[in-house]
Structures are given as structure tokens and as C-alpha cells.
Amino acid sequence: MIFGDALVSELEEGERVEADDGYRGHAPEYVRCPSCIANPPDSERMQQRVRSRHETCNKRFKQWKILREEYRHDLEEHGNVFRAIAVLTQLAFENGEHLFEVEYA
């Protein structure tokens, strides 16, 4: 819902995201997903690697337990906590804790 309600409007004209089949409703205009009819079969391996890289990033957030456990503090602060974790994760990437490389064609 977040993608359809907010993030899709952030894409540039002709830009698409790589996603799993849960986003089929937005394919092929905004999303490249495995079961999309417009998806070339020879790109499946590369797409799996891109999605795997994204899941590795999600793992970093889960290490903070922000996505895994129920948030038990002031709900109004949840967004600030999530943004702080996003910034710390980005700083880690910029300071040597890189994700694996993906050659996207």
C-alpha cells in the first residue's frame, strides 16, 4: 500500500522498480516482477540477485528489531526512530559495511 499510495509518485517517467510478485498490480508500468508478462526470462537470475541485495538491506533494519518486534514506546516517535536507523544504516554503507555488488543490465 505504501508503494501505491506514496512511492510510485516519486518515480521518474519511465523508471521502474525491481520487486517480487506481491507488486504485480503495478507491473509493468512501475514494477519489474518475475511473473510479469513483459519481463524477459533471461533476466530472472539478475533480478533475483537485485532482490536478494535489497533483502540484505532489510536485514540490517531487522538487526535493530524495528521491523521485527512491536514498537512499545510513544507511537508518534516511531517515524523518528525508523529514520534514525535508516541514517545509521546509510552511514554504515558509506563507511565500509557495503552490500554486495550487482551488475544490473
Image (spheres, helix red, strand yellow):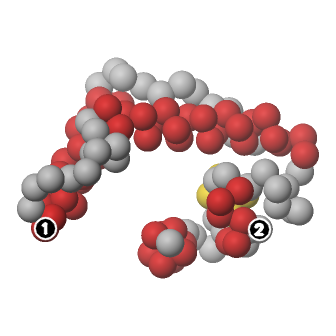
Q: Which amino acid does label 1 sit on?
A: Glu
The residue indicated by pointer 2 is 28
Above or below for 15 versus 46: below
Q: Which amino acid does label 2 sit on?
A: Pro
- Residue ID at (19%, 59%): 78
The residue closer to the viewer here, 22 or 101, is 22
Q: Position of residue 18 (x, y in %)?
A: 65, 52
Left or right: where 37 falls relative to 62 = right
- Residue ID at (32%, 32%): 63
Measured in 3D between alpha carbons, the distance from the residue under mark 1 to the one under mark 2, in whole angstroms, is 36 Å
The residue indicated by pointer 1 is 76
- Residue ID at (82%, 56%): 35
Above or below for 34 versus 36: above
Q: How crowded is mark 2: few (under 14 residues within 10 Å), some or many (20 or more)?
A: some
- Residue ID at (15%, 53%): 72
Above or below for 76 versus 56: below
Q: Residues within 10 Å of mark 1 (few under 14, many from 20)?
A: few
Left or right: where 3 falls relative to 91 = right
Label 2's element? loop
Q: Position of residue 105 (x, y in %)?
A: 75, 42
Q: Earlier in the sequence, mark 1 or mark 2?
A: 2
Q: Quadrant of residue 23?
A: bottom right
